[in-house]
Image (cartoon, grey):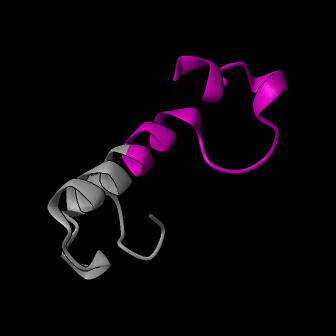
Amino acid sequence: MKALLPIDAANRGRGWRPGQNRSIINGILWRLRCGTPWRDVPPKYGNWYTI
């Protein structure tokens, strides 16, 4: 999975910092595991509309 989340500034282009990608993916996985609506995703994974 680490190969899918590039850390180098040259490889990442514009947009979010790579550190935030991990929390987004964890939020998606949490939602899939629990089967809850998107609005119920805990805030530690970011805003529900950005996941």
Q: Is residue 12 above or below residue 27?
A: above
Q: Is residue 15 above or below residue 8?
A: below
Query: Which corner quadrant holds the C terminus?
Result: bottom left
Q: Residue 3, position in %: x, y?
A: 63, 18
Assign the magenta stretch its main secondary structure.
helix
Residue 13: quadrant of the picture: top right
* Range drawn in magenta: 1-25
Comparing 41 with 31, the one in front is 31
- Is residue 14 shown in magenta? yes
Q: Residue at x 21, y 54 (%)?
A: 33
- Residue 17: image quadrant is top right
The x and y percentages for residue 41 are 22, 67
Residue at 60% over, 29% down: 5
Reply yes or no: does residue 40 show up in magenta.
no
Q: Residue at x 32, y 49 (%)?
A: 29
Residue 31 vertical position relative to residue 7 in the rendered view, above or below: below
x and y, in percent, of residue 26 in the image: 33, 44
